[in-house]
Image (cartoon, helix red, strand yellow):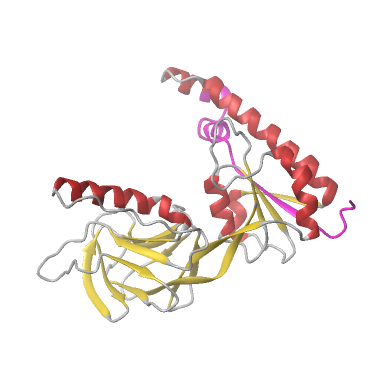
Amino acid sequence: MERGMNKVVIVKRKTRLEDLKRRYNTVEQARFYVEHLGADFRDYEKEHANYYAALECVRQIAGKYAVIQEIDRDYVPNMIFGAEDIVVAVGQDGLVANVMKYLDGQPLLGVNPDAARWDGFLLPFEPGDLERVLPQVTAGHFREKRITMGKAETRDGQVLYAVNDFFVGIKNHTSARYHICYNDTVENQSSSGVIISTGLGMSGWHRSIMAEFRGMAKAFHMGDVPEPEYRWDTEKLVFQVREPYPGRFTQAGLVYGQVTAHDRLSFVSDMAEDGVIFSDGILEDTIEFNAGTRLDITIAERAGRLVQ
């Protein structure tokens, strides 16, 4: 198959060895630091070698069917993807989720560079699989899994998308002050923040909060509390308030709810500084949520397309 006008964007990430080298300037200094702490530096070297072997395999195969553009994950937020681009993320699940929220209909392939090391819920392919899969994708004949995303938008037009979840609160995770409006109910709250999860994100931060709630229910002999499960394409978000404090001027009745196309969820910040909104655990991609800022949470108008 000729490459034609097809373009594959390969998104890579830094390995732990590269992060150590950046921190300690040289591999030798990084080795000394790691081994001084009693860890096996060979594991870092093996992971690095496996990753770059996988990356080279992806390059060689993709080059047969498309023009290649390769970028580091750090530059994805500023990347302008073409409407017909095919995107290949080589890394862990987190890389796939981080890339997906910046796409607008482009198919995304998650490639597991080290199947013996990573499980990879969002990584259905190993590098060699691209020999079979890429021709199908370039021809437009492939199976995909639709992934519902969330959208956070301020009244001044700032927009952030989430594949897993949003965090609304304060940078240092201390008490955040805000008003929450859910449909026709409004509360003045003080909490350690609010988590809004997608169907995919129900297995992440949401699950840890539910584990605490189920443990408390068991301690108070309230019986077992079933954990809700949603498919990745469920047109629904779920919000949870973390550690709400009921006081003279704050309420704690509105702590859990679902957001569908017919629901309204919004927040107004009462914090003078350090208020934040971020998604999928990426602190570098943040919207400030300070005094007077109003934030609306909805189901995104676009969805992720994960090639299967």
Judge whether residue 154 is colored magenta.
Answer: no
Q: Is residue 301 visible?
A: yes
Q: Residue at the bottom extreme?
A: 184
**204 to the left or right of 216:** right
**Residue 5 location in percent, x, y?**
84, 60
Q: Is residue 175 above or below residue 115?
A: below
Q: Residue at the left extreme?
A: 248
Report the residue at 73% width, 38% height from top: 128
Q: Which residues are magenta?
A: 1-30
Q: Nearer the viewer, residue 98 or 106?
A: 106
Q: Is residue 282 above or below residue 127?
A: below
Report the residue at 14% width, 64% height from top: 246
**277 to the left or right of 170:** right
Q: Is residue 93 above or below residue 117?
A: below
Q: Nearer the viewer, residue 218 or 197?
A: 218
Count of numbered circles in the view: 0
Q: Residue at the front extreme?
A: 223
**Residue 16 location in percent, x, y?**
54, 34
**Residue 13 location in percent, x, y?**
60, 43
**286 to the left or right of 275:** right
Hey, which quadrant is residue 290 in on the image? bottom left
Hey, which quadrant is residue 168 in on the image? bottom left
Q: Is residue 7 visible?
A: no
Q: Nearer the viewer, residue 86 or 79?
A: 86
Judge whether residue 5 is colored magenta.
Answer: yes
Report the residue at 64% width, 30% height from top: 50
**Residue 265 location in percent, x, y?**
36, 74
